Image (cartoon, rainbow, N blue to C red):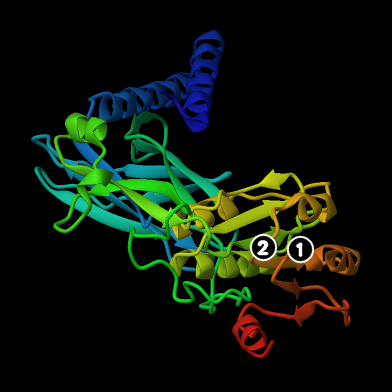
Amino acid sequence: MFTPLGWGTLAGSVVLYVAGLTLGYPEPVVLATGGLLALAGALAWTAPRPRLEVRREVTPLKVPRGDAAVAVLTVTNLGRRGLSGLRAQDRIGGSRHTIDLPRLPRNGGRTVSYPLPTDVRGEIPVGPLLLVRADPFGLTRRVREYGSPATLLVRPRTVPLPVPPSGKAHHLEGPTSDNAPSGTVTFHTLREYVVGDDLRHVHWRSSARTGTLMVRQLIDASLPTTTVVLDTRDRLGELAVDAAASVAVAAARAGFPVRVLTGHGPLTDTKPDAEAVLDRLAVVECGTTGVGEAMRLARGGGSLVLITEDPAEAGRIAGVRRRFDRVICVYVGAGPVSVPGVTVLPIASLDALPVAWRSR
């Protein structure tokens, strides 16, 4: 197809040809003929469909905010002739990234990489990938789409934290086996059988479907739950999401049930799955509802951790402190905040959270 320059050359050549014939001047006709020959040569340059093997990989697909993520593009020329003038265009979020590829020799390939933006939390679509071949004069180009789009998930940043104490003495180190006290177990997930597992926990239907012996993994429902309440009203700073992720992931990786709530309801269930927590917090957005109702309706027991930038929301946590064994408010706003009966941890950066957490 013609580029804007190609269309302009075609229009100019037609005008010159008509003017030359009408006025009887040979020079415009010669210029018009040269322009038409250039267009014909450009079409002949880009018309053949190149035989290419194109592969673009995004690595890693999930990354903490601010960490490095790259797209690796490999283009192999399977044709009998060398190719030049190739340009790759990859859409990244709302922008397009363009790369001029070096000449591809016969049966040769090139690999290039380019960074992906990870400064903003959320899902970043990558693709579709377009390969553009243009003639040396930029009169024509051929565009083809290769591969399928990918999605880069930018998760919150986290810092290591100890599990908040709940006031209960049992299972302080978290569950270490599938054997929980009688009457308090609940199904968590399925996993492959290992020697020593109780055969009563075998899930025969899944075992028949997968061809592998599968057993039910159970967790102790009596373990203290860490309830993390994230205030998303009006504005949502990355520091607040990072702090919520750090607290929730600390409980999940220790094997304790964890629940994450916002003003619009629960983001996660109580299964101790750190990966699921990070995935859900990666896409949380601002809302218009405060967290007072969410805290009031949250099931009591265990630890309650509120992350907020609003002093008014921090004050509302005092009304529910009797229903929990431990209540903590991580305050990421400006100015001092004091809530009777509640441990308030003011932080100005994520790196300050571990220090404040251990000194509470």
Which residue is more in the foreground, 40 or 274?
Answer: 274
Numbered badge on residue 341? none
Helix, strand or loop status at disc 2 = loop
Image quarter of residue 135: top left
Q: Amino acid at mark 2?
A: Gly
- Badge 1 is on which residue? 323
Cα distance in 3D space between marks 1 and 2:
6 Å
Count of labels in the image: 2
Image coordinates for residue 252, horizontal then vertical, percent? 49, 63
Residue at the location (49% across, 76% down)?
172
Residue 37 higher or lower than 89, as above or below: above
Q: Amino acid at mark 1?
A: Arg
Helix, strand or loop status at disc 1 = helix
- Badge 2 is on which residue? 301
Image coordinates for residue 24, horizontal then vertical, percent? 51, 12
| Classed neighbour count for the residue bearing mark 2: other residues with Cα under 10 Å, few (<14), some (14–19), many (≥20) | many
Residue at the location (64% across, 81% down)?
353
Image quarter of residue 324: bottom right
